[in-house]
């Protein structure tokens, strides 16, 4: 039975706030207290020796994560941005080398190349995984290409079989940016070391967190050592480790504290339960939305898992006859106004394609003279609108995202969200005939905008 849409003056589906995400418990408080009482808040020393790779809590955390997923090495860092920078240095990136990147990710997934004089080159996306399209990747390869940074966006693995086949063919290094996908599997393999090196974010908005932080994983002894050097003033330890190739070993202070590591240990113990819960509520939402024509729900390939960092939906405006933004506003009106980013029912577009940002449009990164774009003087790098049409269509017209598929949410909460979507679909003709703005630039809530700022 049809009922009047809330956006047109009817009653809303739900007025009660969605529950906030609560991630810290007594275990984390006890762990933090234990470290505070020890008076050792960091176990690192910036010189070769017993504490070059950190103290007791850091080593325990790294070992726990590595052993749980059968990674040979885990290296903690103070943020995943630092982790990506360390990874790029560890694989041997040199000035003028090109790195194929996703245009639809947090900015650091590409800008880390600049730190070693590398140049981001953007490939388009697949519409089923939202990861790099292997055909587009291969079309972007030149004699200057050194690496591919693969982003497992929203928590679902990219097409790693095809990407690794291309990398092997062209002798390229592969970095897996799994910031949003801890504990996720691709065809039975844990992501992170399908490529040469990968890693995860421990930022406040991620599945498990310590406020800020990151973790690199690799099965290569050589890459692991170089990561450890870059993490902790490697220039002071070159002789002790008897390195012949000392390039890219100048380090920084990207170290993880004992306090963070102690909290991370307790957080990590909860990861599988978090993933299991998200799988249940994600499957429930999919069961409600899958048969709605015009809403394309992500399919989970056999042997693959999804962390549901966010729940993606592809919207077809040609089916509904209204813009994505108007559809979103109608759904949002049926639900409580969010107070926090993770209680936002639904948002649109994710991030603007990275190559459209000023740093690429003006080709100014390090200094004012165009470094590193000017290193390959014979090359004209193209960052114009239209180079990644799938990405641009996702951003401008198609992609809807929800952060509600998470811990703290029950099936009855997800039911209200699904009911709101179904109500709008059932009354779409009323929405289509209304005088409401169909302008896709219409703002919804400040809280929705906050999602783009906190990826």
Image: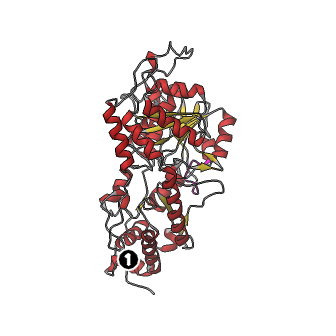
- Front-most of residues 199 and 101: 199
- Front-most of residues 180 and 363: 180
Give the number of marks: 1
Quadrant the N terminus occupies: bottom left
Q: Magenta segment, which residues? A: 127-135
Give the image location of residue 111, x and y in percent.
44, 37
Residue sitting farthest toward the bottom: 1
**Residue 236 sits in quarter:** top left
Q: Residue at x 65, y 54 (%)?
A: 303
**Residue 5 sits in quarter:** bottom left
Q: Secondary structure at mark 1?
A: loop
78 with respect to 302 (left or right):
left
Examine the structure image and report whether residue 271 is included in the region drawn in magenta.
no
Please tell me whether the stretch drawn in magenta is mainly helix, strand or loop. loop
Q: Residue at x 39, y 52 (%)?
A: 23
Does 403 appear above or below 241?
A: below
Residue 235 appears in the figure: yes
Q: How does the figure colour the protein chain or chains?
A: secondary structure
Give the image location of residue 177, x and y in percent.
51, 42
Give the image location of residue 90, x and y in percent.
53, 27
Does 62 appear above or below 386?
A: above
Give the image location of residue 119, x and y in percent.
49, 33
Examine the structure image and report whether residue 134 is included in the region drawn in magenta.
yes
**Residue 198 sits in quarter:** top right
Q: Identify residue for label 1.
A: 13
Residue 376 appears in the figure: no
Q: Are there few (<14), some (14-19), or many (20+) residues within 10 Å of tag 1?
A: many
Q: Residue at x 47, y 50 (%)?
A: 270
């Amino acid at each position: 039975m049809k009922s009047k849409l809330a956006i047109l003056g009817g009653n809303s589906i739900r007025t009660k706030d969605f529950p906030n995400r609560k991630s810290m418990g007594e275990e984390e408080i006890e762990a933090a207290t234990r470290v505070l009482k020890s008076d050792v808040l960091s176990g690192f020393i910036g010189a070769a020796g017993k504490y070059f790779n950190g103290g007791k809590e850091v080593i325990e955390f790294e070992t726990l994560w590595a052993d749980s997923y059968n990674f040979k090495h885990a290296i903690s860092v103070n943020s995943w941005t630092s982790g990506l920078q360390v990874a790029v240095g560890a694989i041997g990136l040199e000035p003028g080398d090109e790195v194929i990147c996703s245009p639809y990710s947090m900015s650091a997934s590409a800008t880390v190349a600049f730190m070693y004089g590398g140049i981001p080159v953007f490939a388009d996306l697949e519409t089923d995984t939202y990861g790099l399209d292997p055909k587009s990747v291969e079309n972007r390869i030149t004699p200057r290409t050194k690496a591919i940074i693969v982003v497992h966006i929203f928590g679902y693995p990219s097409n790693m079989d095809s990407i690794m086949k291309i990398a092997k063919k062209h002798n390229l290094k592969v970095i897996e940016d799994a910031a949003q996908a801890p504990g996720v599997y691709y065809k039975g393999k844990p992501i992170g070391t399908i490529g040469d090196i990968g890693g995860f974010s421990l930022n406040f908005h991620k599945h498990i967190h310590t406020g800020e932080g990151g973790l690199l994983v690799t099965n290569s002894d050589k890459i692991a050592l170089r990561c450890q050097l870059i993490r902790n003033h490697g220039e002071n330890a070159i002789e002790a480790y008897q390195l012949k190739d000392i390039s890219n070993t100048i380090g920084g202070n990207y170290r993880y504290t004992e306090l963070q590591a102690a909290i991370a240990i307790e957080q990590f113990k909860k990861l599988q339960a978090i993933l299991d819960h998200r799988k249940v509520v994600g499957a429930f939402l999919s069961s409600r939305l899958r048969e709605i024509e015009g809403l394309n729900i992500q399919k989970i390939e056999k042997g693959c898992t999804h962390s549901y960092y966010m729940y993606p939906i592809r919207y077809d405006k040609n089916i509904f006859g209204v813009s994505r933004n108007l559809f979103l506003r109608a759904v949002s009106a049926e639900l409580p106004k969010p107070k926090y980013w993770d209680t936002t029912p639904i948002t649109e577009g994710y991030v603007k394609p990275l190559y459209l940002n000023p740093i690429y449009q003006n080709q100014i990164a390090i200094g004012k003279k165009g470094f590193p774009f000017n290193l390959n003087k014979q090359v004209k790098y193209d960052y114009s609108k239209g180079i990644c049409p799938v990405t641009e269509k996702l951003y401008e017209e198609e992609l809807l995202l929800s952060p509600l598929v998470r811990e703290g949410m029950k099936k009855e909460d997800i039911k209200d969200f699904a009911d709101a979507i179904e109500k709008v679909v059932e009354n779409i003709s009323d929405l289509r005939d209304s005088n409401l703005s169909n302008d896709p630039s219409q703002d919804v809530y400040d809280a929705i905008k906050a999602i783009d700022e906190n990826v």
